[in-house]
Image (cartoon, rainbow, N blue to C red):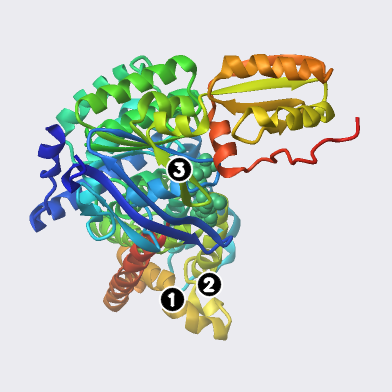
Amino acid sequence: MGANSSIAVDAHDLVKVFPRGHVRALDGVSLEVEAGTILGLLGPNGAGKTTAVRILSTIIGPDSGHATILGHDVVKEADTVRRIIGLAGQNAAVDDYLTGRENIRMVGRLSHMSWKSVGARADELLETFGLTDAGNRVLKTYSGGMRRRLDLAAALVAQPPILFLDEPTTGLDPQSRQDLWRVIEGLVAEGTTVLLTTQYLEEADRLARDIVVIDHGRVIAQGTPAQLKADLGTSVVSVTLADAGTAQRAAVLLAPLSAQPPLVEGATVDLTVDDGPKVAVEVLRSLDSAALSLAGLALREPSLDDVFLTLTGHKAEVANDGGTPA
Amino acid sequence: MTTITVATRPTEAPAGHRLRFMFADMITVTWRNLLALTRIPEALFFTTLQPIMFVLLFRYVFGGAIPIPGGIPYVDYMMPGIFVQAVMFGAVGTSVGLAEDLQKGLIERFRALPMARSAVLAGRTTADAVRNVFVVLIMTGVAFAVGFRINTTVVDYVLGAALLVAFAYSMSWGFAAIGLAAPNSETAQVMAFPILIPLTFASTAFVPIQALPGWLQVFARHQPVSVVINGARSLMVGGYYHSTSSLWYALLWIAALLIVLVPLGVWRYRKTS
Ligand SMILES: Nc1ncnc2c1ncn2[C@@H]1O[C@H](COP(=O)(O)OP(=O)(O)OP(=O)(O)O)[C@@H](O)[C@H]1O
Ligand SMILES: [Mg+2]
C-alpha cells in the first residue's frame, strides 16, 4: 500500500487565482485518490471544489502546482487525460434541443466510440438512470432531476476509469439519490476511481473511503469519515430554548459539557460530543437547575454543517460574555 | 486489476487517426447543431421568412428608385446583394450559437472530452454554412417568383451562390471569436452588428458604386462584401457585370479571411475558460 502506482489522481499544491474579483480559489491544495476508491471533497460554497475538479479534468490550467491522472499530467498530457476521465460538472451540461438518447450519443461519439457501441450503451445508461421512457424526448421537457441524471449518464458513456462528479446528487429526490449511490458503488466495485464533491456529509460518509475538507482554497482536514468524526465527536445534542437571548445564556452554561465550543444559531444551541445520550441528560439537569425552559431537544449525527462550523468557525461561536440581558 | 489494464491503454494517437478523428468530431458537432436547429421551429420559420422579406422589400419598395448601369433590371442586380446580406446574417448566427453553448456549459463539457479542439468551431461554422445553403435555395425560389432570371448558366449561378456561402463561412470564424468573447448570446448578436452593418450597407450590394459619396467609394470598392458581390454578379448576372478579375479578387478575400479568422477563432476558443 502507499506505492505510487496505486494513486490514480494525484494533485500537488494546486493554486488558482481568478484575476476578475481577485479570488484565490485554490491556495495550495494537495490530494490523492487511490485507484478503485472514492474520495469525497467537501467544503462550503466557494471553497474551491469546482475549481479543483475543473483543473483535474483539464478544463482550466492551474497557476502553479501540478496534477496527474493515472500518471498523466493534466496540463502536458491533457489529451491523454481526457481519454480516461468522465466528468459530470456541477451544472448539467446538456443540449436542450436534443433528446436524452442523442445527448448520450453525442458525448459517446466525441469520445470516439463507434456508432454501434454508442447506441447500445445509450440504451443501457438510459435504463440504469430510469430514463428509458424519456429517452426520445428533447431535454427541454425534462425536470431538473432528470437533466441531472442524464448528465451523469453522459459522463459514463465511454466507461472511463476515472470519474469526476461535482455535487452529483444535488437536486435529486431521495430515491434517485439512493439509486445513484448504488450506481457509483457498482462502478467502484468494478475498479473505477471516483472523486466526488458534495455538500452532504451523509453522502461522503456512505460512499467515500477518504474525505478531504477544503475551505478558502486550502485543505483544512482530511482522513477517513471515521477519523473525521472521531475528531469532531460522534453526536450532536441540539437544544432549542425559548428565544435567542436565552440560548446565549444556555450556551455559556452548557459550554463545559463539550470539548468543542457550543454553536448558537437563533434560539438553538448545538453541542458536539462523544456520548450524546449521557450529555443530553446533563443538559436537561443544568437547564432545569438554572430554571431555563426548554422548547426542544434533539440528538443527531454531526452534519456537514457541524464539520464546517467546527473546522472553519465560519458562523459565530458563542463568546464567553455571550450572555445578553434577560 | 481493471484499473491497471486500463491505465496502460491511453497512448498518443498516430497522426492519421488524429486527422480522422478531427473530421469525425466535426461531423458529430455539425450533426448536433443541425439537429438542434430543426428542433426549434420558430428559428427555422424566421430563418426562412427573413430572406423572403428581404427579396420582396427590395424588389417592390426600393426596386424602381435605383438606376442601374448595364441595362439590366434592378431585380437582377440586387439579387446577389440580398443573398450576401442573408448569408451574413446567417454567419452572425455562429456567434450567437457559440455564446449559447458557452452559457449552457456545453463548451465546458467539450473541453473535458478527447475530441479535436477544432471540432466545436468547425462543426458550428459548417452547420451554419449548411443553413445558409438552405437560405440561398429558398431565396432563389422567391427571386424567380418575383421576376429574377438567370442570364448566365445554371452552373455559373450555382457557383456564384457557392461563392457567397463560402464567404459567409469565412466570416463565421470571425463571428465565432466574437461569440466566445461575449458574456451572453444576446450581447453576442449586438457585438456582431458593428461589423455586419457597415460591411453590408457601405457596399455595392444594393446600389452601384457611383451612387455612393466619393470618400466612401474607396472603402466600398475594396471591402470584402463588395468584392465578393462583384464576383458573384460576374457569375450570376454576367454581361456588363462579367469580370474574371473580380472573381479572383473575391477568392483572394475569402482565402485571406480564412487565413486570419480561423486561427483567431481557434485562439479565442483555447483562451475561453
Ligand atoms: N471563472 C471565475 N471567475 C472568477 N472567480 C471565480 C471563477 N470561478 C470560481 N470563482 C471563485 O472562486 C472561488 C471558488 O469557487 P468554486 O466554484 O471552486 O467553489 P465551490 O467550492 O465549487 O463552491 P459551491 O459549493 O458553491 O459550488 C469562489 O470564490 C468563486 O467566486
Ligand atoms: Mg462548485
Establish whether ligand 1 lies closer than 8 Å to the Cβ of label 2: no
Under mark 2, the amino acid is Ala
Left or right of residue B148, residue B126 in this image: left
Where residue B55 appears, as percent x and y from the top left, is: 50, 52
Q: Chain of mark 2?
A: B
Give the mark nearest the N terminus, 1 or 2.
Answer: 2
Local SS, label 2: loop
Q: Which residue is mark 3?
A: A221
- Specify whether disc 3 shares its chain with disc 2: no
Q: Which residue is mark 2?
A: B202
- Specify whether disc 1 shares its chain with disc 2: yes
Under mark 3, the amino acid is Ala
Q: Chain of mark 3?
A: A
Left or right of residue A20, residue B108 in this image: left
Of the two numbered discs 3 and 2 in the rendering, the one whose residue sits closer to the viewer: 3
Quarter occupied by residue A250: top right
Q: Which mark is residue B223?
A: 1
Q: Nearer the viewer, residue A290 or B204?
A: A290
